[in-house]
Image: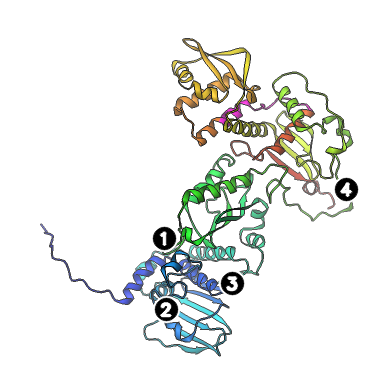
Amino acid sequence: MAHYNPRMPTIARLPDLLISQIAAGEVVERPASVLKELLENSLDAGSRAIQVHLEEGGVKLIRVSDDGCGIAKEQLALALTRHATSKIASLDDLEQVRTLGFRGEALASVAAVARLTLTSRERGATHAWKLAGVAGAEPEPAALMAGTVVEMRDLYFNTPARRKFLKAEGTEFAHCAEAVKRQALTRPDVAFSLSHNGRNLFQLAPADRARRIADILGDDFLAAARAVDAAAGPLAIAGYAIDPTRAGEAKDGQYIFINGRFARDKVIGHALREAYRDVLHGSRQPAVCLFIDIDPALVDVNVHPAKTEVRFRDARAMHQFVFHAVQRTLATPVDRPAVGGFASPPQDRSISAPETARPAAWQPPRQQSALGIAEPATTAYLAFARAAQGGGEAPRPAAHTSETSDAGGPPLGYALAQLHGIYILAQNARGLVLVDMHAAHERILYEKLKAACDSRQIATQALLIPAVFSADPLAIAAAEEHAAVLAELGFQIAAVGPNQLAVRGVPALLQAGDPTALARALLDELREHGLSQLSTARRDELLANMACHGAVRARRQLTPPEMNALLRQMEETERAGQCNHGRPTWSELSLDQLDKLFLRGQ
């Protein structure tokens, strides 16, 4: 049996090359890691144009050329030394770092695991100098107009064990391309080009932020996103967040930049999930491109060698700031469309025949004058609510007046008809609007319930005849235990026998719903979670379920005034583009899209 020998081995200083190779393991994970560091150096050098050339996914060659300030001859060797940098000189600099790179390890680490060549011409210098990243090398004269060229060849040529962990060429190239795109997104004022194996893949000219986002993420993303813009004290946020109805299932669509640096942060990720919580359907994911500015003293970007993780001094404040900024953007009502949100879809302008010309100022068709389009929203909503509750005939529509017939008309237009008792067809200035009436009414009720619950003003509507239903002992016990919660939510439920409960009152907003179904669903929820004090998330789920049960059901025939009342309420309701389950509540077909469908002008 082997015995442990307590005698310690001799302590020895590691060779410099081995130290650099160990450091390289932290910084140089794959070719994209090298490329990221080189791009950051180019941007920190004040470059206005950066060219990237790759071979074999960046494993064989990465060449980054820029027109930055360059490096003086006498500093080339120092640039390849560990812990040598021009970007920080003191602890104060480190705590308020404003550059992308600053650790002073990148070039030395790369030179330890690859063949590195550095060519640079300082501004004002007579010519360029070139230095190979090997011990004892001396700078040599070189030809270069301006800036710096860093060339890395044969990554991990001297550490074959690490090379085995690299993926296929296509995978490594995809990571490299992503690194270029991230830097291009944060610096739209800089030109970028990328080539792979001699093939030019993209060339981006300097542009504004929106154009650069469209160039990188696609016009479809920009058209389907809403503009985010908010500021509070030392915090500011700008960019775009995907409209919930246009979100996909990809999990890699979040681009977050902190002071110009791409970052992955759990605090911000959670804030985004919360902001999208009740407007995303199924497994869809929030896609965003957001730029956050914060006082550098309030964020630590030195958490990890790759600098993709950050730590905020006040994480809660950052969470709340991002959450409220994105939530407010997504809550924009229909009558205040944001970029790519409730605005009309991108239109196909290829049809230009005279017969498709549209009048400059749109007015509701004359034959719609009987649809109650001039009713104030409040009056119209009362009509809708009364009819939906079976409370008799809706009021007769008022006459159309000039006050309601502006050139554009309301965003969702005016009702034309009801389709199969499920959808409302409406006409607006752009074309045809289709509304899922149950989903739309569900969202309206949900938002009203949340507002009433926040202000503790959920009104109770007493039932003329109590709704009595059979209940098991657990349901009866839940009604008694959670009587205070039920009362806060507008319900009056009491036992009337050993196996029966009676609903004597329901929330006034839900009086059109089935009181028994509402009561059963609510009691089941309370039994399962045992909530005496509802958390916000749990409370919202309860309210969402209540709104779903209380919303007007499919096959319910609505009159034109009722349909128009619903449209006007949608325009006044936050997050009206999605129901409580994240499904879209309405969609639009522009006249150009309809013309294309029917081949008009072709």
Residue at position x 50%, y 20% from top?
A: 483
Q: Which residue is mark 4?
A: 359
Residue 594 percent coordinates (x, y) = 79, 45
Task: Indicate yes or no whether the magenta region holds residue 545.
Answer: yes
Return the disc, 1 or 2, that comes first in the chain's sequence: 2
Q: Is residue 35 left or right of residue 573?
A: left
Q: Which residue is mark 1?
A: 303
Report the span colored magenta. 543-559
Return the disc, 2 or 3, that comes first in the chain's sequence: 2
Q: Relative to 479, is 529 above or below?
A: below
Return the disc, 3 or 1, that comes first in the chain's sequence: 3
Question: Identity of the amino acid at label 2?
Answer: Leu
Toward the viewer: 305 or 295? 295
Q: Which residue is mark 3?
A: 199
Task: Indicate yes or no whether the magenta region holds residue 180.
Answer: no
Label 3 CA crowd tier, 10 Å (few <14, some 14–19, many 20+): few
Q: Which residue is mark 2?
A: 80
Question: Identity of the amino acid at label 3?
Answer: Arg
The CA span between labels 3 and 1 is 37 Å
Residue 425 percent coordinates (x, y) = 76, 35
Q: Secondary structure at mark 3?
A: strand
Question: Identity of the amino acid at label 1?
Answer: Val
| Tag 4 near tag 3, CB within 8 Å | no
